[in-house]
Image (cartoon, helix red, strand yellow):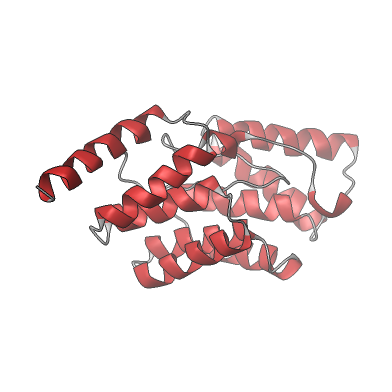
């Protein structure tokens, strides 16, 4: 896989909040909107939270983590803070901390597709590929039009299962749902399709 970064795609998207640290991330993962469950932050905390999100967008994870931790501890039901904190820890490959933040988010809402996507990413980092596949598929079942989960599932099939047919199907769905904005993935999928074509001759 020479045209896509081989690091785990730490990419999740929430209507609650979200961003990404990975170069091949679906662009939708950088959207930021209102917090979950109508959690009201004071003006000072709102600034801290938005600054943390901006820090994550610019890969300044070390700056983001203390601020997100403060918001999450002060507002335990703020699911966006917990999910962004999990994403930040994933970026640092701090698996235990990411699992703890993900578990807290799941305790708030156990039926969010984005949480299963996070669990899939954690499973990949631990080498539990069958578990990762199960979680990505659950994310897609909960939210069929979820580009990031399709991308991560395609990446799993591509890198770890060496199943380019299933990988291409998931990448194609991701490209369709993300309006074809990820040119690197489009280019890589074109190469994979050429491999399939040569194989089938």
Q: Is residue 10 visible?
A: yes
Q: Position of residue 4 (x, y in %)?
A: 30, 38
Q: Quadrant of residue 82?
A: bottom right
- With 191 as the anchor, is 27 left or right in this view? right
Q: Quadrant of residue 114?
A: bottom right
Considering depth in this image, is 37 or 150 the residue closer to the camera?
150
Q: Residue at x 90, y 46 (%)?
A: 40
- With 77 as the anchor, is 111 left or right in this view? left
Q: Position of residue 162 (x, y in %)?
A: 23, 58
Tell me the quadrant of the picture where the N terminus can be found: top left
Q: Given the current orientation, which residue lies at the most extreme left position? A: 201
Q: Residue at x 47, y 51 (%)?
A: 150
Q: Residue at x 53, y 40 (%)?
A: 177
Q: Is residue 8 visible?
A: no
Q: Position of residue 78 (x, y in %)?
A: 78, 54
Q: Position of residue 50 (x, y in %)?
A: 73, 34
Whether residue 125 is situated above or below residue 196 in the rendered picture: below
Considering depth in this image, is 46 or 28 the residue closer to the camera?
28
Question: How many labels sit on residues?
Answer: 0
Whether residue 109 is situated above or below residue 81 in the rendered picture: below
- With 155 as the anchor, is 100 left or right in this view? right
């Amino acid at each position: 896989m020479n045209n896509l970064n081989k690091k785990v795609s730490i990419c999740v998207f929430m209507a609650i909040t979200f961003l990404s640290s990975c170069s091949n991330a679906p662009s939708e993962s950088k959207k930021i909107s209102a917090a979950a469950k109508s959690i009201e932050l004071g003006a000072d905390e709102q600034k801290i939270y938005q600054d943390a999100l901006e820090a994550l967008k610019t890969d300044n994870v070390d700056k983001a983590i203390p601020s997100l931790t403060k918001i999450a501890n002060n507002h335990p039901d703020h699911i966006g803070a917990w999910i962004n904190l999990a994403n930040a820890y994933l970026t640092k490959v701090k698996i235990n901390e990411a699992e703890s933040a993900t578990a807290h988010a799941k305790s708030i809402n156990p039926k969010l597709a984005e949480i299963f996507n996070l669990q899939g990413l954690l499973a990949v980092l631990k080498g539990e590929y069958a578990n990762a596949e199960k979680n990505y598929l659950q994310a897609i079942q909960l939210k069929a039009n979820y580009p990031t989960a399709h991308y991560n599932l395609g990446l799993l099939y591509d890198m770890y299962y060496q199943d380019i047919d299933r990988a291409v199907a998931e990448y194609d769905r991701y490209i369709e749902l993300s309006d074809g904005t990820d040119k690197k993935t489009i280019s890589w999928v074109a190469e994979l399709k050429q491999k399939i074509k040569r194989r089938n001759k």
